[in-house]
Image (cartoon, rainbow, N blue to C red):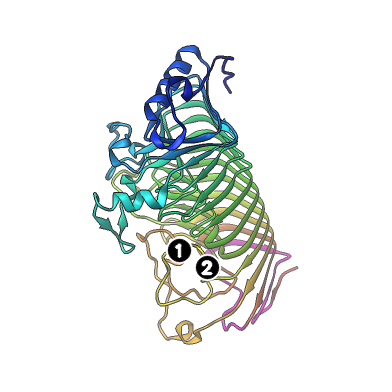
Amino acid sequence: MPSPSSFVFTPQDFGAKADGATHDTAAIQAAVEAAHRARGTVLFPPGRYLSGTIHLRSHIQFELGYGAVLIGSLEREAYQRIPETGVPVEGQDSACWYSLLLGHGLDGVVITGRGTLNGNGSRLCEAFAHHYPPVGPQKKIDEKYRPLLINLVECRRCEVSGLTLEEGASWMQSYSRCVDLRLENLRVEGISAWNNDGLDLCDSREVVIRGCHINAADDGICLKSTHLPVEDVVISDCVVRSSASGIKCGTASSQGFRNISISNVVIFDTARSGITLQVVDGGTLEQVAVSNVTMRNVGNAIYLRLGDRSRRNAAHRNVGALRQVTISNVVAEVTGFDADAGYPFRAPRHEPRLNPLPSAIVGLPDAKIEAITLSNIRLLYRGGLHAPESILTPGNEVPESRADYPEYDQFGELPAWGFYLRHASDIVFRDVRARLEGEDVRPGLVQDDVEGFEVKGCRFEGNEVLTTA
């Protein structure tokens, strides 16, 4: 990581008031330009700095000191975005969204300190509602018009650390097509609006995400691949709470994911899956290791999905692949439908309400998930069926849902309470144990079109007990 020199500039040197009422954008930008020329530091003393978009520059340290709060403006005209990059995509490239801190093509930037980035999210959404029509079932402003707190695009050798990020209006932070990136010890409070993803990593490689505490009204940590594969990523020692999924790969998956390590993670009060790994846009997910994960009060524990949305920008114009995944040392308490109770913005959920859904590994008849190993897994399912007739209805077969948006409840009711496996090969379960507290007519484990299933030392305790030595 870069080591900025001792040249230090404050926004006050250029006329900033830091009173929370006066726009300090010009003063802050002037301090950034001075630090860029000197390869120095922009230091924010304690105060409240009201600002629109700040354009970061290479070879600077942007440091919010203790007691310093950088607050997003409520004025629509105060925000800028990176111009279109010319990469063909369906719709607008998320890398081009508006942001409070914005960087494009930078080298050697450190964004750090013990201060706070505050996006003024709930108030900003109210202010912007006069300019943009609401969309979707939630009748909210499209996320591409709501500014992020941090958006770095095509940057190298950068670090973001120590800060608190709060009150976002959209995704809290996004890093697209970046190389050699460190995101450490961040505290993220993103529950002010819909789509408040805690951290989005897109098309990037050589990334470390460590020691972050994330509370998000959408996915906690989300890896997305549209133009480039996401490669060589380490996620460790993080705590995540989410009204959607805790850690997810594959909302966008055209190019895929390789060499991903997720370890020493706590996930709690999370509506959907704690860990979600999926490919639905033609890429390949492989060489992914998940270990030492504790989940408490989650809607679902583990979800692996290979689907086919047939997006026009898919890498190979085919289904893709999901293979070579190991998941080990996981303890999870699965509570189901209302795991995100208490969030001001809750995740949309299946209606009518489904019975408890198992962890699942589900591919397609012509594209099986391959080479998955689960070991030392402990799952506790609290509660049981609330509507047995919805399971027992004749002809209630599981649909393929080939092109559906990938989510753990996309198939509707499933025929197992613990694990459901379909269209997969070379699956290994070692010391996988699941216990159900409650009544259920379903077995703990169901497999359908699975080739090469090795089970050793596994036990499912509920309506049916499966024991393999």
> Looking at the rendered structure, which numbered label has been put on residue 320?
none
Magenta stretch encompasses residue 459 = yes
Q: Quadrant of the C terminus?
A: bottom right
Residue at the image point whose x is 54% and y is 53% from the top: 215
3D distance between C-alphas at marks 2 and 1: 8 Å
Residue at the image point whose x is 32% and y is 32% from the top: 82
Q: Quadrant of the N terminus?
A: top right
How far from the left and from the top, in percent, is residue 9? Answer: 51, 19
Classify residue 30 as left or right of residue 180: left
Residue 462 visible in rendering: yes
How far from the left and from the top, in percent, is residue 115? Answer: 56, 36
Residue at the image point whose x is 43% and y is 68% from the top: 349
* Within-10-Å neighbours for mark 1: few <14, some 14–19, many 20+: many
Q: Earlier in the sequence, mark 2 or mark 1?
A: 2
Q: Is residue 245 above or below residue 64?
A: below
Quarter of image, res 241: bottom right
Type of amino acid at the residue the image marks with label 1:
Arg
How far from the left and from the top, in percent, is residue 430? Answer: 69, 60
* Within-10-Å neighbours for mark 2: few <14, some 14–19, many 20+: some
User: Which residue reaches farthest top?
Assistant: 38
Residue 105 visible in rendering: no
**Badge 2 vs badge 1, beta-carbon distance below 8 Å:** yes
- Which SS class for mark 2? loop
> Looking at the rendered structure, which numbered label has been put on residue 341?
2
Magenta-drawn segment? 439-465
Comparing 341 with 465, the one in front is 341
Q: How many marks?
A: 2
Q: Is residue 22 above or below residue 119?
A: above
Magenta stretch encompasses residue 195 = no
Q: Which residue is mark 1?
A: 346
Residue at the image point whose x is 51% and y is 15% from the top: 39
Q: Is residue 360 above or below residue 233?
A: below
